Amino acid sequence: MKLVVAVIQDQDSNRLSNALTKYNFRATKLASTGGFLRSGNTTFLVGVDDERIPQLLDVIRDNCRSREQMVAPVSPLGGSADSYIPYPVEVEVGGATVFVLPIEQFHQF
């Protein structure tokens, strides 16, 4: 058994949640915040048998797309804000960051 932790952008959250339900994956959905862009993310925790890992990864890959987005950089915390000019930059957002962790024991009460 494995624990899959998938951090995705909020825009993909409902689509992934519906797909997980469709393919009979049980997941816990947590609100989270990204450190780089400080934007909303959703973290899914999914306990899954080893043989279903490829199917789960396909579901995540098919429902979490990366996209280009213009963002204003965050002002520097330690430096002088006088010389800081926040020009928007285009960055790639979305997609999924997925961790697959081994589980030693599983209990359901």
Image (spheres, grey):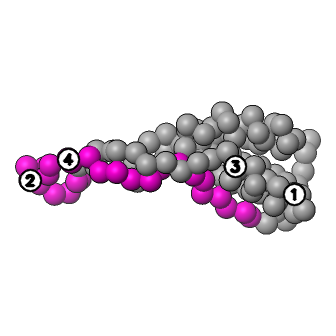
Say which residue label 1 marks.
52
Q: Secondary structure at mark 1?
A: helix
Q: Position of residue 67 (x, y in %)?
A: 49, 48
Q: Is residue 101 left or right of residue 41?
A: right
Say which residue label 3 marks.
62
Instruction: Say which residue appears at 49% left-offset and 44% top-offset.
Output: 33
Say which residue label 2 marks.
83
Instruction: Say which residue appears at 7% left-offset and 49% top-offset.
Output: 82
Relative height, residue 23 to residue 79 (above, below) = above
Q: Secondary structure at mark 4?
A: loop
Q: Earlier in the sequence, mark 3 or mark 4?
A: 3
| C-alpha gap between disc 1 and disc 3 | 16 Å
Say which residue label 4 marks.
86
Disc number lying in front (1 or 3): 3
Q: Which residues are magenta?
A: 76-101
| C-alpha gap between disc 2 and disc 3 | 43 Å
Q: Amino acid at mark 4?
A: Pro
100 part of magenta stretch: yes
Q: Amino acid at mark 1?
A: Arg
